[in-house]
Image (cartoon, helix red, strand yellow):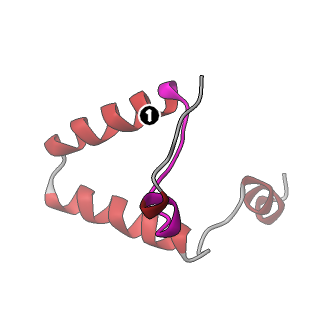
Amino acid sequence: MAITIPKNLIKNDDIVLIPKKEYEKLFNFWTSAESLNKREKKSIENGFYEIQNGKFYTSREVKKQLGL
């Protein structure tokens, strides 16, 4: 089976391929996000922004800081 991906999607980084189970998890998360209040949505947006900009700690760094 061959899949052809249009060049206009590839050149603009407008395509993401993920396993179906991961897609379903994301879909379920975002559909349930509608029930979040404004403050909760803002916290999630801030978290994504921080991750995107490298402002986060890995689990290894947290363990090291805690002396674990």
Q: Residue at 44% of width from left, 59% of height from top?
A: 9
Q: Give the range drawn in magenta.
A: 9-21
Q: In this view, does 31 lie above or below 7?
A: above
Residue picked out by circle 1: 23
Which of the 4 image quarters holds residue 57?
Answer: bottom right
Q: Residue at 45% of width from left, 52% of height from top?
A: 6
Between 22 and 17, the one nearer to me in the picture: 17
Between 45 and 6, the one nearer to me in the picture: 6
* Rendered location of residue 59, percent (x, y): 73, 53
Between 67 and 60, the one nearer to me in the picture: 60
Kind of residue sitting beneath label 1: Tyr
Q: Of helix, strand and loop, which one carries label 1?
A: helix
Q: Residue at 16% of width from left, 44% of height from top?
A: 34
Q: Residue at 23% of width from left, 37% of height from top?
A: 31
Q: In this view, does 41 lie above or below 23?
A: below
* Rendered location of residue 12, percent (x, y): 46, 69
Specify few, some or many for label 1: CA neighbours under 10 Å numbering under 14, 14-19, or 20 or more: few
